[in-house]
Image (cartoon, rainbow, N blue to C red):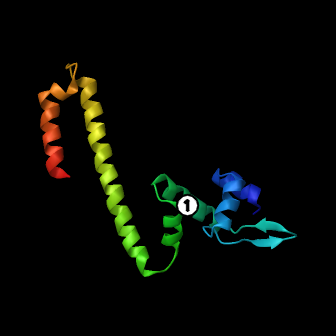
Amino acid sequence: MTIGQLAELTNVPASAIRYWERHGLLPAPERRSGQRRYPPQAADRIVLLRKFQQAGLSLAEVREFQQDQPQRQAMIRAKVAEIEQRMLDLDHAHQLLTHALQCSRTDIVTCPTFRDRMATWGHSD
């Protein structure tokens, strides 16, 4: 498929695809008459790149993830721990906001239910 078709299929601008290619995040495609021609698997790789970006991985981390090297395992473990902490933080924020919708207190920090929850957060982290 052409870069335009790949861009349309993945909803990623062609400029981003070319950028990822230049930086080794996407394999260089074969060329026919000077035009890039991508295999169907390129779309899967782009979906993976987007997911990694959405999860907060830098381009350097994505590149490292794609390499077969010992540091890869350490980087993955560190990133999993970071994501798990973010998930916990998001869960706490969700609990606070959900409770705030139902709480009659003007200042949520003075609410005994909320204070009890906050006390458990400090111990569960």
Residue 43 versus residue 30 in the image, above or below: above
Quadrant location of the N terminus? bottom right
Q: Residue 92 at what x, y percent from top left?
A: 26, 42
The residue under the point 52% across, 72% down is: 66
Q: Residue furthest right?
A: 33
**Where is residue 39 shown, x and y percent of the image?**
69, 69
Front-most of residues 110 and 36: 110
Residue corresponding to mark 1: 49
Can you tell which quarter of the image residue 27 is in? bottom right
Q: Residue at x 43, y 74 (%)?
A: 72
Which residue appears at 14% of the width and 50% of the height? 123
Residue at the (80%, 72%) spot, across then down: 31
Image quadrant where residue 117 sits:
top left
Asked which secondary structure carries label 1, the reply is helix
Name the kind of residue labelled 1 in the image: Leu
Q: Is residue 122 above or below residue 98?
A: below
Q: Is residue 106 left or right of residue 58?
A: left
How many C-alpha atoms fall within 10 Å of the one at disc 1: few (<14), some, or many (≥20)? some
The x and y percentages for residue 107 are: 21, 22
